[in-house]
Amino acid sequence: MSAELDAMVAARRRAEMVARMRTLARTAAGAPGRGAGPSGARPSGGGPSGGSQERCDLCNTTLPDDHRHMLHLVDRRIVCTCEACWALHSGDAEYRPTGKRTLWLDDFQCAAEVWAGFQIPIGLAFFMRSTVTDSVVAFYPSPAGATESELTLEAWEPLVQANPALEQLDPDSEALVVNRLTEPAQYVVLPIDQCYALVGLIKSRWEGISGGGAIEEAVPQFFAAIRARSTGAPETVG
């Protein structure tokens, strides 16, 4: 590895020390998981002691738990990467590094008629601006993983007008996560890999037709862990 690449990797590390999907999923669910794509969390391999060994999706080298992720823009698939591959491929046209913001929107405004216009059958979804389709794509959990739904401009614009913070939503790398299963509803901007981590977590716990414990237990735990991380408060698991 050249000195220039070493310097690049070191700079990236200093600039983006954020919690990674695997750590978050373990905290929220109490169970291990690998990088998640549109179909949910991928199974991880186990060693003799029952542990898992992460590997870079691009070069197959062994990865630490706090490794980096990128989004494959066309497949909308989370890619686990080592430091070298992250530095080499971050500028590629087909990949986008995942975001690093956790931004709670406690004063978020979402009228019932605006939400109804999205035609999402569950009160839990995340919304990403896609540069591939030049549109906003909604993802919501289902037994098969993340179900996608492209939104029309007419449906999305009223939400942006009521919440100007959405104008700064970084395309492809982060998303608005909406949890209307609680009272009051929760709205937060998260890195896109953490959004897929939530989908994979729900898929791994899905029961029956309606989801059962996946909705009733995993979702509140996930959001409690996110809130605790962003405020520095102790994390609790119900």
Image: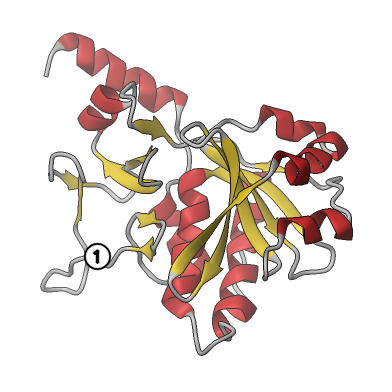
Looking at numbered disc 1 in the image, what kind of residue is underneath it?
A: Ser
User: Looking at the image, which residue is at 83% across and 46% down?
Assistant: 108
Answer left or right for 28 relative to 12. Answer: right
**Residue 145 at what x, y percent from top left?**
45, 67
**Residue 164 at what x, y percent from top left?**
81, 31
Quadrant of the drawing holding the C terminus: bottom right
**Residue 131 at what x, y percent from top left?**
50, 31
Front residue of this view, candidates 5 and 113:
113
Answer left or right for 16 relative to 127. Answer: left
Number of callouts: 1
User: Looking at the image, which residue is at 29% across and 16% down?
Assistant: 8
Quick one: label 1, few (<14), some, or many (20+) residues within 10 Å? some
- Image vertical order of residue 15 relative to residue 33, above or below: above
Quadrant of the drawing holding the N terminus: top left
Residue 206 seen in this snapshot? yes
User: Looking at the image, which residue is at 68% across and 28% down?
Assistant: 168
- Image vertical order of residue 212 relative to residue 34, above or below: below
- Image vertical order of residue 82 relative to residue 177, above or below: above
Residue 27 seen in this snapshot? no
- Image vertical order of residue 110 relative to residue 235, above or below: above
**Residue 105 at what x, y percent from top left?**
77, 44
Front residue of this view, candidates 139 and 229:
139
Q: Secondary structure at mark 1?
A: loop
Disc 1: which residue: 44
User: Looking at the image, which residue is at 59% across and 84% down?
Assistant: 210
Question: Can you tell which quarter of the image residue 72 is in?
Answer: top left
**What is the image's colouring?**
secondary structure
